[in-house]
């Protein structure tokens, strides 16, 4: 068994080492390598980054879990830094959210954040956003936390 910490433990260590933690946005493996060289302790893959950089699309919820997994795997294969991934609304109901958590952890992701917009989400700076009821967001978070494959994997709520 490996003696290195889990990706989640590495993310938590980065949070403890730098307050506030500066996380570099990395839309691909090359950007991740540059961020590592610049001394960042953690990386961030945004939903907008996947949509914009990988597909030339606006961040309007048109990318899938598989699209995000492809970019996340490339980043985690290139650098050892912990990766925080934007999983938007989780791509559906509790079962798809749970699948996303398991697959992203398997890809070496350290942390995710899940948001409270309706499924037809819009990028945070765009007009016309709608939120789900608080109870539904709670259910999303419960599904994500229940699916964590190890205790140190980080699930964040985002509004």
Image (tube, helix red, strand yellow):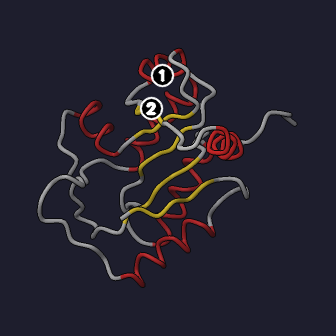
Along the horizontal axis of the image, is 54 left or right of 114? left
Measuring 29% from the left and 31% from the top, which residue is drawn there? 54
Q: Nearer the viewer, residue 118 or 22?
A: 22
Quadrant location of the N terminus in the rendered image: top right
Measuring 21% from the left and 71% from the top, which residue is drawn there? 130
Along the horizontal axis of the image, is 75 left or right of 124? right
**Local crowd at mark 1 within 10 Å, few (<14), some, or many (≥20)?**
many
Q: Nearer the viewer, residue 159 or 85?
A: 159
Location of residue 53 with respect to 145 vertically, above or below: above
For residue 143, which quarter of the picture? bottom right
Q: Earlier in the sequence, mark 1 or mark 2?
A: 2
Location of residue 54 with respect to 85 vertically, above or below: above
Q: Position of residue 129 (x, y in %)?
A: 19, 66
Quadrant location of the C terminus in the rendered image: bottom left
**Local crowd at mark 2 within 10 Å, few (<14), some, or many (≥20)?**
many
**Number of numbered discs:** 2
Secondary structure, mark 2, is strand
Which residue is tagged 1? 35
Disc 1 to disc 2, C-alpha distance: 6 Å
Along the horizontal axis of the image, is 52 left or right of 92? left
Q: Nearer the viewer, residue 138 or 146?
A: 138
Outermost residue toward the left? Answer: 127
**Contact (Cβ within 8 Å) of mark 1 with mark 2:** yes
Q: Position of residue 49 (x, y in %)?
A: 31, 37
Location of residue 29 with respect to 55 vertically, above or below: above
Secondary structure, mark 1, is helix
Measuring 27% from the left and 40% from the top, which residue is drawn there? 51
Which residue is tagged 2? 24
Measuring 24% from the left and 50% from the top, which residue is drawn there? 62
């Amino acid at each position: 068994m490996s003696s290195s910490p889990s990706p989640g433990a590495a993310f938590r260590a980065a949070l403890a080492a730098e307050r506030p933690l500066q996380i570099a946005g990395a839309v691909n493996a090359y950007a991740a390598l540059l961020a590592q060289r610049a001394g960042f302790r953690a990386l961030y893959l945004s939903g907008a980054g996947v949509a914009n950089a990988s597909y030339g699309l606006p961040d309007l919820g048109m990318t899938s879990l598989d699209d995000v997994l492809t970019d996340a795997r490339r980043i985690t294969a290139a650098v050892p830094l912990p990766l925080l991934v934007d999983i938007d609304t989780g791509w559906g109901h509790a079962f798809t959210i749970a699948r996303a958590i398991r697959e992203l952890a398997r890809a070496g992701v350290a942390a995710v954040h899940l948001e409270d917009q309706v499924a037809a989400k819009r990028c945070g700076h765009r007009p016309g956003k709608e939120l789900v009821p608080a109870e539904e967001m709670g259910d999303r978070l419960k599904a994500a936390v229940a699916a964590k494959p190890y205790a140190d994997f980080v699930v964040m709520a985002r509004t």
